[in-house]
Image (cartoon, rainbow, N blue to C red):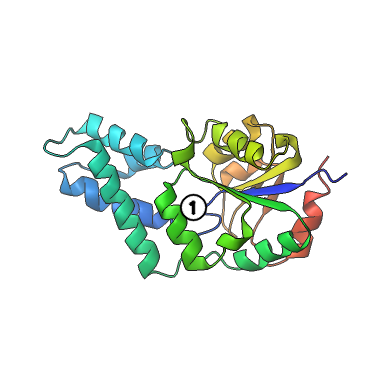
């Protein structure tokens, strides 16, 4: 029996290069509300859900006349428009997904992004057909770094977490997958990623699909 029966992908930074869009949207929306968005504090919010980010900035510099939910929706709509307007594909993702499906692996997506953004990304990239299960933060009570999103995805795939490998680019995501009992692959996109030291293996890019597939089965 194979050690790995499913591969579960993070979305932002792994499936789609959208992290800069989140920073831009948050800067635009929160600045318009009178918040001074500093680089230091923006770094603290990078692993938060949209709801958590809004609560964070509201605590630092409260705004009136608009609810946090409405602010979240503004951020989400801006990110969606940026995804639609820009080329943000991670190279060779579609090739990699196609290969994994040809090897009869189950594929999941587990993301802290809202489901409305997930739909936009998957439709634009034309890769929704590859995923057996898609879990956004809207489907769980707690986002990453809590393991719930990965435990939920494994349950929907009818697999033990130990039969799954998660591909993540952040320490927060790797923590969630590891605490769920999964193996962890760090995706670096040919860049520096200190969180990669926390992973079971490193994927620099998705160009050599067969080599990555073999790495999966070198894991204990």
Question: Could you say which quadrant of the image residue 179 lies in?
Answer: top right
Task: Give x and y (percent) for residue 159.
Answer: 72, 38
The secondary structure type at the circle numbered 1 is: loop
**Residue drawn 68% across the image and 49% down it:** 7
Q: Does residue 177 show up?
A: yes
Q: Furthest residue to the right?
A: 1
Which quadrant, please, contains the N terminus?
top right
Instruction: Determine whether, in the image, residue 37 is placed left or right of residue 209.
Output: left
Task: Give x and y (percent) for residue 51.
Answer: 34, 37
Between 216 and 148, the one nearer to me in the picture: 148
Q: How many marks?
A: 1
**Residue drawn 55% across the image and 40% down it:** 173
Which quadrant, please, contains the C terminus?
top right
User: Which residue does the numbered mark 1 point to in the structure image?
Assistant: 12
Between 127 and 36, the one nearer to me in the picture: 127
Instruction: Determine whether, in the image, residue 56 is placed left or right of residue 162.
Output: left
Q: Is residue 39 above or below residue 212?
A: above
Task: Give x and y (percent) for residue 38.
Answer: 28, 43
Q: Does residue 198 show up?
A: no
């Amino acid at each position: 029996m194979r050690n790995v029966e499913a591969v579960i992908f993070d979305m932002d930074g792994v499936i789609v290069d959208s992290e800069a869009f989140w920073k831009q949207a948050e800067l635009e929306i929160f600045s318009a509300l009178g918040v001074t968005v500093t680089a230091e504090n923006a770094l603290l919010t990078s692993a938060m859900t949209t709801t958590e980010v809004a609560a964070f900035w509201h605590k630092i510099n409260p705004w009136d006349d608009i609810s946090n939910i409405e602010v979240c929706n503004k951020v989400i709509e801006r990110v969606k428009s940026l995804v639609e307007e820009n080329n943000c594909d991670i190279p060779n993702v579609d090739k990699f997904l196609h290969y994994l499906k040809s090897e009869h692996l189950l594929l999941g997506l587990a993301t802290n992004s809202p489901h409305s953004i997930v739909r936009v990304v998957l439709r634009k990239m034309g890769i929704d057909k590859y995923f057996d299960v898609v879990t956004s933060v809207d489907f769980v009570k707690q986002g990453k770094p809590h393991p719930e999103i990965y435990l939920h995805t494994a349950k929907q795939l009818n697999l033990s977490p130990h039969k799954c490998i998660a591909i993540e680019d952040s320490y927060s995501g790797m923590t969630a997958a590891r605490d769920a009992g999964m193996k962890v692959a760090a995706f670096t996109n040919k860049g520096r990623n200190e969180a990669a030291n926390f992973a079971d293996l490193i994927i620099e890019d998705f160009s050599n699909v067969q080599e990555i597939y073999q790495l999966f089965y070198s894991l204990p």
